[in-house]
Image: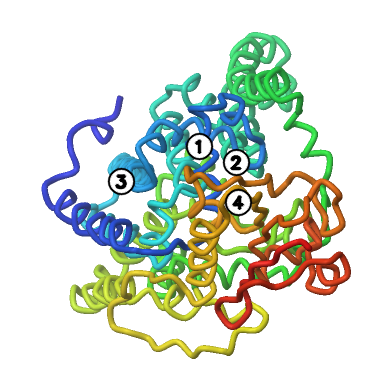
């Protein structure tokens, strides 16, 4: 084993690690809202595992994410968030270890280049798929670089259990294995049949380890839920709802997600002279390949992508390492002052988080007047939006007034506010329509202008009126309403 894989990262690495993690911890503890409604849905599914073990294999909630988060979810949302943030901190340490193995200098600032990426403070702690995917991915790289191939294969095979597109990374890992020096496919290409035959058992064993998590998930889900998650890979266009977009969109997302200063350092670092290139570095190519894959998926409108920026947040370790190359190159060519200024800009804009202050709003909700956001030097904790506050107030109204009446809603936040109350909740995905006879007279509906009207539910105001529903109360400029069935 190389000496570069031994020893610690130094006290200044941990000082910077603490500073970076403190910023995310502050956000986790003081944010009153959430970056995505999906977080609340994921959290409730994880907590429901304790009352219904079948929920562990819930396909939408990603079994791989669920397995990593259902235990802390038992203790509440904050506990689940703190555990997820700890995973992000572990990923940051693994990234530092990889930087040391690569012989990089200036590793003490690596946590700043990772923790002050604009998306990191808001996506490192939520009960979502981003951090679990990030930590499993970098763990797979870490183990592979240390020749722990069976364990590495399990990590790479676990990725599609956390996010479906991880199966492409699993395949790339398989190619990296068989085409490596001494690998099965490399011998075949050279016509060395005897050597290929000797290499085959190792390739088969690692292939089995890579497929094992997917096999276990499908068997468990099939037995417990009667569903086969593998089939989703054969349904490339399950809905038209998410649409498509320009092929360059994810380049923009990288700049506004990781942050323009970090990305500029990364670009500068990518064009620094590369020395000692060997086969192992090709495993890092899975990161830009992931960006390309998401660009193509959304461009073609496949797999319900939606083109959301947070999908590529798991690239944060790679972005930080290449940005560190840029920082070092800047220092070597132009001196300490420009390099220090670049790092300061990374930290200052990481505290400002412009993409969060400008981009996270409820202006897209029909009926709400446009609210112009002001940019503050330090991003304040997230408050409930006007729309989110309306959902909360509507839920509180229901808790106070519903009594024995059944209540239907389509917003995860409403389900969260009603969670573990005495309100008789109907399953949002129960196939109900405004005309459903199963919805008795007097049934209450927490209607919202974002989810209720979507194709999956179809509770438009016009259909509700025709089907005999009346408005009882309104909130947030009528973007949230309480309906009662006559």
Q: Residue at x 73, y 13 (%)?
A: 193
Q: CA distance from mark 1 to mark 2?
A: 8 Å
Q: From the viewer's perspective, is the residue at label 2 or at label 3 nearer?
A: 2
- Local crowd at mark 1 within 10 Å, few (<14), some, or many (≥20)? many
N-terminal of the two: label 4 or label 1? 1
Q: CA distance from mark 1 to mark 3?
A: 22 Å
| Residue position marked by numbered label 2 in the rendering | 61
- Local crowd at mark 3 within 10 Å, few (<14), some, or many (≥20)? many
Residue 311 seen in the figure = no
In the picture, residue 253 is in which quadrant?
A: bottom right
| Residue sitting nearer the eye, 248 or 391 | 391
| Residue sitting nearer the eye, 115 or 38 | 38
Q: Position of residue 172 (x, y in %)?
A: 63, 38
In the picture, residue 142 is in which quadrant?
A: top left
Marker disc for residue 297: none
Marker disc for residue 89: 3
Q: CA distance from mark 4 to mark 2?
A: 21 Å
Q: CA distance from mark 4 to mark 3?
A: 22 Å
Element at label 3: helix
Marker disc for residue 46: 1
Residue 483 seen in the figure = yes
- Seen in the picture, residue 421 relative to 364 is either above or below; the reply is above
Q: From the viewer's perspective, is the residue at label 1 or at label 3 nearer?
A: 1
Q: Position of residue 439 (x, y in %)?
A: 78, 50
Q: CA distance from mark 4 to mark 1?
A: 27 Å
Element at label 1: helix
Q: Mark 2 and 3 residues: CB-CB less than 8 Å, in contact? A: no
Q: Mark 1 and 2 residues: CB-CB less than 8 Å, in contact? A: yes
| Residue position marked by numbered label 4 in the rendering | 290
N-terminal of the two: label 1 or label 2? 1
Q: From the viewer's perspective, is the residue at label 4 or at label 3 nearer?
A: 3
Q: Residue at x 17, y 37 (%)?
A: 8
């Amino acid at each position: 084993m190389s000496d570069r894989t031994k020893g610690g990262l130094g006290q200044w690495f941990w000082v910077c690690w603490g500073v970076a993690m403190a910023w995310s911890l502050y956000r986790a503890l003081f944010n009153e809202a959430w970056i995505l409604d999906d977080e609340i849905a994921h959290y409730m599914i994880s907590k429901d595992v304790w009352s219904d073990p079948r929920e562990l294999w819930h396909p939408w909630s990603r079994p791989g994410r669920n397995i990593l988060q259902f235990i802390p979810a038992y203790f509440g949302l904050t506990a689940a968030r703190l555990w997820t943030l700890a995973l992000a901190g572990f990923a940051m340490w693994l990234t530092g270890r990889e930087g040391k193995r690569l012989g990089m200098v200036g590793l003490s600032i690596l946590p700043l280049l990772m923790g002050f990426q604009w998306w990191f403070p808001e996506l490192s702690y939520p009960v979502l798929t981003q951090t679990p995917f990030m930590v499993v991915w970098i763990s797979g790289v870490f183990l592979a670089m240390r020749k722990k191939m069976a364990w590495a294969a399990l990590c790479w095979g676990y990725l599609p259990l956390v996010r479906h597109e991880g199966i492409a990374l699993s395949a790339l890992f398989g190619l990296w294995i068989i085409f490596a020096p001494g690998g099965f496919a490399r011998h075949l290409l050279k016509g060395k049949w005897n050597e290929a035959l000797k290499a085959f058992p190792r390739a088969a064993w690692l292939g089995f380890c890579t497929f094992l998590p997917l096999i276990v998930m499908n068997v468990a889900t099939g037995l417990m839920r009667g569903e086969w998650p593998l089939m989703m890979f054969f349904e490339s266009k399950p809905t038209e709802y998410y649409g498509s977009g320009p092929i360059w969109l994810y380049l923009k997302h990288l700049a506004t997600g990781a942050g323009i200063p970090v990305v500029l350092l990364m670009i500068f670092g990518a064009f620094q002279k590369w020395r000692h290139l060997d086969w192992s570095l090709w495993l890092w190519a899975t990161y830009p390949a992931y960006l390309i894959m998401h660009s193509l998926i959304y461009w073609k409108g496949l797999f319900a992508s939606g083109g959301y920026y947070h999908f590529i947040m798991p690239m944060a370790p790679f972005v930080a390492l290449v940005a560190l190359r840029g920082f070092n190159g800047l220092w070597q060519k132009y001196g300490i002052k420009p390099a220090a200024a670049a790092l300061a800009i990374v930290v200052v804009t990481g505290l400002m988080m412009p993409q969060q202050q400008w981009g996270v709003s409820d202006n897209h909700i029909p009926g709400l007047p446009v609210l112009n956001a002001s940019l503050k030097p330090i991003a304040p904790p997230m408050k409930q939006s006007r729309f989110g506050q309306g959902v909360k107030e509507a839920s509180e109204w229901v808790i106070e007034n519903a009594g024995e009446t059944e209540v239907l809603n389509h917003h995860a936040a409403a389900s969260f506010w009603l969670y573990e109350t005495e309100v008789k909740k109907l399953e949002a995905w129960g196939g109900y329509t405004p005309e459903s006879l199963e919805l008795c007279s007097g049934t209450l509906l927490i209607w919202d202008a974002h989810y209720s009207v979507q194709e999956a539910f179809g509770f438009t105001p016009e259909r509700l009126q025709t089907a005999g529903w009346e408005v009882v109360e309104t909130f947030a400029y009528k973007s949230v309403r309480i309906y009662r069935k006559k």
